[in-house]
Image (spheres, rainbow, N blue to C red):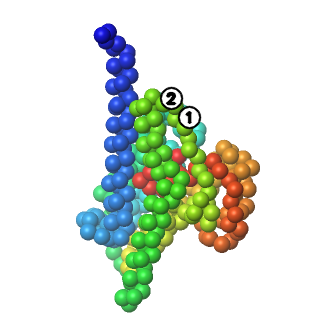
């Protein structure tokens, strides 16, 4: 049997691409799971309420704001089509999404690691029934985030479909988006889930408030950029979708939705992009 070095190199390249995509996804899973605990103040050593202690309030504010800004810049710049076209000149197309997911996850891990404590309580709910309700809403927000990724294409959103298509040597087929379930209620249920999770808390500290305000501001700005890109890509079909389905608040417009082909990009450890 004749050994073909080129064929062996190609197989090795495909395996490395698939391994890279899987590793990036695993880092995302760590960052996502920690995000739930970080925002909820559950078990983990660093949370939005209790990060690194000892920094003066002004310095803590500047550091935390810079961490949020770094995440916003990385998330938004790398999500833009022009950047992706430029970036794909250096990163194989199959790895582009996984690289985005990996870098976004690493920026989140940096935020968790370097977040400074900003003490002080804005509100505190002590009534047990209301506390239980707020924790239920908090959990529902995160459940909405996760469910929304599967209502589009979870595995494409986080780069797995692309790298395993390259591993098999098959052309990438973009599955697109069909407005089902939550996407018939709002155009961005994933982002709505984040907003719910970030604000639903029985104890709102100064640090948590800064995090909630910063991420909310970023989400509202990022959605404007994302919708501009979707209109450029999908044209009238997305314009029709916008007229029929509200952005974030259910019930403001009609729920009927014929559009197909739109892709929502996630906040957080994964995309927009």
Residue 27 position in % (x across, y down): 33, 49
Q: Position of residue 21 (x, y in %)?
A: 38, 40
Give whichever of 3, 204 is nearer the camera.
Answer: 3
Q: Is residue 169 above or below residue 128?
A: above
Q: Residue furthest bottom?
A: 127
Residue drawn at x 61%, y 70% as measured from the top left: 249
Q: Residue at x 41, y 71 (%)?
A: 139
Q: Are marks 1 and 2 in contact (CB under 8 Å)?
A: yes
Residue 197 seen in the current view: yes
**SS assignment at label 1:** helix
* Quadrant holding the N terminus: top left
Give 88 or 236, whichever is nearer the viewer.
Answer: 236
Tell me the quarter of the picture where residue 22 sits. Answer: top left
Q: Position of residue 229 (x, y in %)?
A: 63, 47
Pointer 2 residue:
89
Specify the quadrant of the image occupied by residue 44.
bottom left
Q: Is residue 147 shown above or below 2?
A: below
Mark number, residue 157: none
Counting from the top left corner in percent of width and height, residue 191 is at: 52, 62
What residue occupies the far front of the structure in this picture? 1
When the figure is inspected, residue 5 is found, relative to residue 198, above or below; the finding is: above
Position of 234 with respect to 29 (left or right) is right
**What residue do we see at 62% from left, 66% from top?**
185
Helix, strand or loop at mark 2: loop
What crowding class fits label 2: few (fewer than 14 Cα within 10 Å), some (14-19), or many (20 or more)?
few
Regarding residue 111, the answer to whether it shows in the image is: no
The residues bearing labels 1 and 2 have C-alpha atoms spaced at a distance of: 7 Å
Nearest the eye: 229 or 124: 229
Please indicate whether residue 33 sits to the left or right of residue 92 in the image.
Answer: left
Q: Which residue is mark 1?
A: 85
């Amino acid at each position: 049997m004749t050994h073909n070095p080129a064929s062996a190199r190609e197989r090795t390249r495909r395996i490395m691409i698939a391994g890279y995509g899987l590793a990036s996804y695993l880092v995302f899973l760590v960052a996502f799971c920690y995000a739930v605990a970080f925002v909820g103040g559950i078990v983990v050593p660093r949370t939005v309420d209790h990060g690194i202690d000892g920094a003066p309030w002004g310095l803590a504010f500047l550091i935390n704001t810079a961490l949020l800004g770094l995440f916003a810049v990385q998330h938004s710049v790398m999500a833009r089509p022009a950047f992706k076209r430029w970036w794909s000149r250096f990163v194989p197309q199959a790895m582009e999404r996984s690289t985005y997911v990996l870098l976004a996850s690493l920026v989140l891990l940096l935020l968790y690691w370097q977040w400074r404590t900003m003490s002080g309580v804005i509100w505190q709910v002590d009534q047990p029934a209301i506390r239980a309700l707020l924790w239920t809403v908090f959990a529902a927000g995160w459940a909405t985030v996760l469910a929304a990724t599967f209502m589009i294409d979870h595995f494409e959103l986080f780069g797995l479909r692309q790298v395993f298509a390259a591993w098999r040597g098959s052309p990438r087929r973009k599955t697109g988006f069909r407005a089902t379930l939550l996407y018939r209620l709002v155009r961005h249920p994933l982002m709505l889930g984040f907003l719910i999770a970030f604000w639903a808390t029985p104890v709102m500290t100064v640090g948590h408030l800064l995090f909630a305000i910063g991420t909310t501001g970023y989400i509202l700005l990022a959605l404007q950029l994302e919708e501009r890109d979707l209109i450029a890509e999908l044209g009238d079909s997305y314009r029709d979708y916008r007229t029929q389905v509200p952005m974030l608040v259910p019930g403001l417009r009609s729920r009927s939705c014929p559009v197909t082909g739109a892709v929502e990009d996630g906040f957080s450890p994964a995309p927009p992009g």
